[in-house]
Image: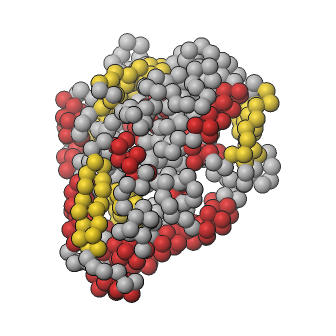
Amino acid sequence: MNRKTLVLPALAGLLAPVLTACGGSGGSGDGGNPIVVGVASQIEATKAAPAPLDPAQAYDVDAWNVLRSTLQTLMRLPRTGTAPVPEAAESCGFRDTQNEQYRCTLRSGLKFSNGHALTAQDVKFSIDRMRAINDGNGPVSLLSGIDKVEAPSDSEVVFHLKKPDATFPQKLATPAAAIVDSEVYPKTRLYNGFNVVGSGPYTLKTERKKGRVTKAVFTKNPSYKGGEKPKSETVEMRFFDDSGAMEKALRSGGIDLMNRGLSPTQVRGLENSRNNHIVLQEMPGQEIRYLAFNTKASAVSDKAVRQAMAQLVNRSQLVRDVYSYTGDPLYSIVPTGLTGHINSFFTKYGNPSVSAARKTLQQAHINTPVKLTLTYTTHHYGSSTVQEFRTLQRQLNQSKLFDVDIKGIDGWQQFRTDSTAGKYAAYGMGWFPDFPDADNYIAPFVGKGNFLNSPYRSSTIESQVIPQTRQQTDRNAAAAGFKQAQDTFADDVPIIPLWQGKQYVAARDDVTGVEWALNSSSSLQMWELGRGVAD
């Protein structure tokens, strides 16, 4: 996910609860106080991105959290684990030995929140619509392997894939495959604004100011038929300008839970807040932060420049001085904890070395110092981002091999639009997994229409690794291919992985279901949250 958005270390992997909120398993009940979730980020509509809650455009963590609660997909991730289970579907599965035809049968009696029946024709419409709109900033690439979709009856959907893809069930569990009402959503253009018409566990109403959502109210959908069991009648999501204001609201009781945007200082402070009726839970994470390159930009078009940067970046210093060990150094685009991970960047470049970087540049006849600007988004990934980029600037400039400036961009949508347009030579990005598989850290970053719109190409990864690993239903058997891809990334350096985050959830101690608040893709499962009795 772009996701994909990132903020403080966060992420996926099998969730292993460390602490559990006190209280029973009851929800807020009829007329009870809503569970209020704080978010230190923005959902906004801009001229370039006018439909932040249309699944054809939405491709960041906060928007996906909204869509997962309001729109259904055929499959979904369970409370824990990585194997998807049926959601709007009653059953799904491959119907051939080559993993090229995938067939689903829908649950009976599905309805959208407006009362319209949800049929297989709506599923076909939704997938075809996503591909027809083909929004460059959206998640359409997740569905690029589909050849055609058929709806032979009101309850049956058949997907014909261009090539075998064992990860396809995982992709059907993402909002990229969300089912929308064919009578409401335009067929070939975006559904602008902040309305959502879906069949998920909750319906949605939003409050906005100056094109940004200030509050989202989720109310239990009486027409919902699926595998989830919402614990609260109402959940609210409130948006804050920064994590400091969000923490203040948590401590005062203005919100009940937050899990993104926490600074390392806040994590340390919240660890000792049990006597203030706040519980902090730490979970394994697969959020990653990385530097991305426009490999055609003159400053970084020679891969020797990018390799020299990889030889100078001190990840341990970033994790220690900026993030206070709330993350771990990352030496591959694929994070630790996933099948096939190897430390390819450390194997190739070792510990930070000015002499090695100087030799790399000299052998490529690169004049030094190399002038370069590192661009970052100021709020989207949390308040520590500016310190992170100041640290990167200092590391590179102290070598005397680089002359680096840094530039912060305030609006996420503007940053995202400009980065995909190739306006930045090097820029900071984060990635939450669309689904918990190494494929989702490799395929989105290569080939035509990749998530970054990067000009980088690798015939080895595109024509060999991805097709071969997608034929492997046993993901352990795909590990060799994933290792080859990681080594290729380390040699070509289209990106430099920096760190892998941990995930934290801070909640009032009367909130139940905190241990299930995040699934294996680090998505917020709002339907799991209820209210019990505090100790």
Of residues 463 and 173, the one nearer the viewer is: 463
**Coloring basis for residues:** secondary structure
- Give left or right: position of 266 versus 215: left
Q: Quadrant of residue 239?
A: top left
Q: Total number of numbered labels?
A: 0
Residue 318 seen by the camera: no
Q: Quadrant of residue 424?
A: bottom left
Residue 188 in percent (x, y) is at 60, 31
Residue 400 in percent (x, y) is at 22, 78
The residue depicted at 66 percent of the width and 27 percent of the height is 122
Residue 292 in percent (x, y) is at 40, 60
Residue 51 in percent (x, y) is at 45, 31
Of residues 413 and 465, the one nearer the viewer is: 413
Residue 193 seen by the camera: yes
**With respect to residue 400, does 430 lie above or below?**
above
Q: Quadrant of residue 446?
A: bottom right
**With respect to residue 144, does 389 lie above or below?**
below
- Give left or right: position of 192 versus 141: left
The residue depicted at 24 percent of the width and 41 percent of the height is 243
The residue depicted at 35 percent of the width and 76 percent of the height is 308
Quadrant in the picture for the C terminus: top left
User: Which residue extends farthest front?
Assistant: 298
